[in-house]
Amino acid sequence: MSNASWDRSRCSVAGTLAVVGEKWSLLVLREAFLGVRRFADFQRQLGAPKAVLTDRLGTLVEQGILRRVPYQAEGERQRHEYRLTAKGLDLYPTLVALMQWGDRYLADDGVPPLSLEHRDCGSPVHLGLVCDEGHELTGARDVHAVPRSTAVTSG
Amino acid sequence: MSNASWDRSRCSVAGTLAVVGEKWSLLVLREAFLGVRRFADFQRQLGAPKAVLTDRLGTLVEQGILRRVPYQAEGERQRHEYRLTAKGLDLYPTLVALMQWGDRYLADDGVPPLSLEHRDCGSPVHLGLVCDEGHELTGARDVHAVPRSTAVTSG
DNA sequence: CGGGGGAGGTTCGTCAAGTGAACCCAGCGT
DNA sequence: ACGCTGGGTTCACTTGACGAACCTCCCCCG
């Protein structure tokens, strides 16, 4: 098991999960990608308890994934909305990955509830593993994982 | 907000998170992709409480993401190991997506702790959004989400 | 100026989930 | 017969999620 021995404590998967892995966080982001920006709308769509939602939004703002933007609709008092930052937008593939797997294995009626299309050409979009040579890989089997940690063992 | 109104209750993101979104589940899978197969090794690598680990492994087996395979090392009694099924292998992009984001935004020293390379050609592998026309998209902004639900509103 | 109402929270009691340590059982080696 | 190891289970405790109630700010209506 060559790969079974490197320092897991600073693994990026664990790190990312520490940031967005709590309950509701990724669902909040899903809503954000769907255009939701206001507290009440998040709450309506998700049905999450307000206290939890407050906490999650706060954490995501702290982490620089969302930012609070004040705005004022005419005839209303000033409010603020939550918008994705660049850092937040980069979580899109994560959500797409979750969605794609769910579409494949959980779709009750075989029809995914949401489909993604290329804004320019209109054809369906999917997430794929590609290498820098341009080859499209078929899955985990085509990948070789190389630890870069403060290596050991052989010395 | 055109996309803000479809039936979220059967969203694939939520569905997938219901299956693998609990604490430790995705980390268990990370280990599985790194070749870990035995209970004690999962426990050692993750440091998760045994009770939780038992539960997560059980759930993942129930869900058909892992399967228990009996095996016998020589001079030892029969044991079983946990192996990824095809359904489990298909979660690879999800983990890669989490990893890629963490590599970009959380790597303390700028060096990701693990890099992936194409087994055939050796060049680095990354996850990308592509459309069926072959265009590589740059991010969420290039995607248009189309709900397929039992549509409403206009009637 | 007084009151209603909605956005955006906070507080509280309850209940589920995660945590770590201790314990248990089956089988192999001696 | 006895202990060691893998693979768990049980238990007491702490943390987190939940839902309902409440609170505040400020715009609008009267």
Image: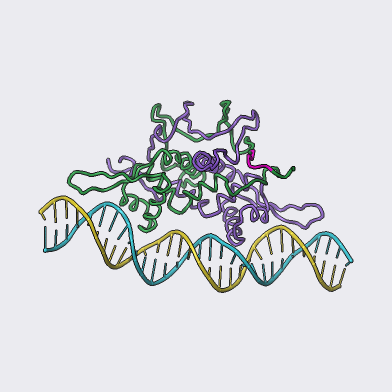
Chain colours: A purple, B green, C yellow, D cyan
Q: Position of residue A31 (x, y in %)?
A: 62, 48
Q: Is residue B60 above or below residue A130?
A: below
From this viewpoint, is residue A3 visible?
A: yes
Residue B43 at x, y = what percent?
A: 34, 53
Quadrant (top left/top right/bottom left/bottom right) for the N terminus of chain B? top right
Q: Image point 55% across, 49% down: which residue?
A: A26
In the picture provided, is B128 more to the left or to the right than A155?
Answer: right
Q: Nearer the viewer, residue D7 or A89?
A: D7
x 57%, y 38%: residue = A111
Q: Position of residue B155 (x, y in %)?
A: 74, 43
Left or right relative to B95: residue B144: right
Q: Residue at x 39, y 57 (%)?
A: B52
Q: Residue A77 location, x and y as percent?
A: 77, 58
Asked if the magenta segment contains residue B149, the reply would be yes
Q: Which residue appears at 33% of the width and 52% of the height?
A: B44
From the viewer's side, name the closer residue of A109 and B44. Answer: A109
Say whether residue A27 is magenta.
no
> In the rendered structure, which segment of residues is drawn in magenta?
B146-151
Query: Number of labelled discs?
Result: 0
Q: Is C20 placed left or right of A112 in the picture? A: left
Left or right? Give the position of A64 relative to A138. right
**Viewer-nearest residue: C2 or A86:** C2
Residue A148 in sight here: no
Majority secondary structure in the magenta region: loop
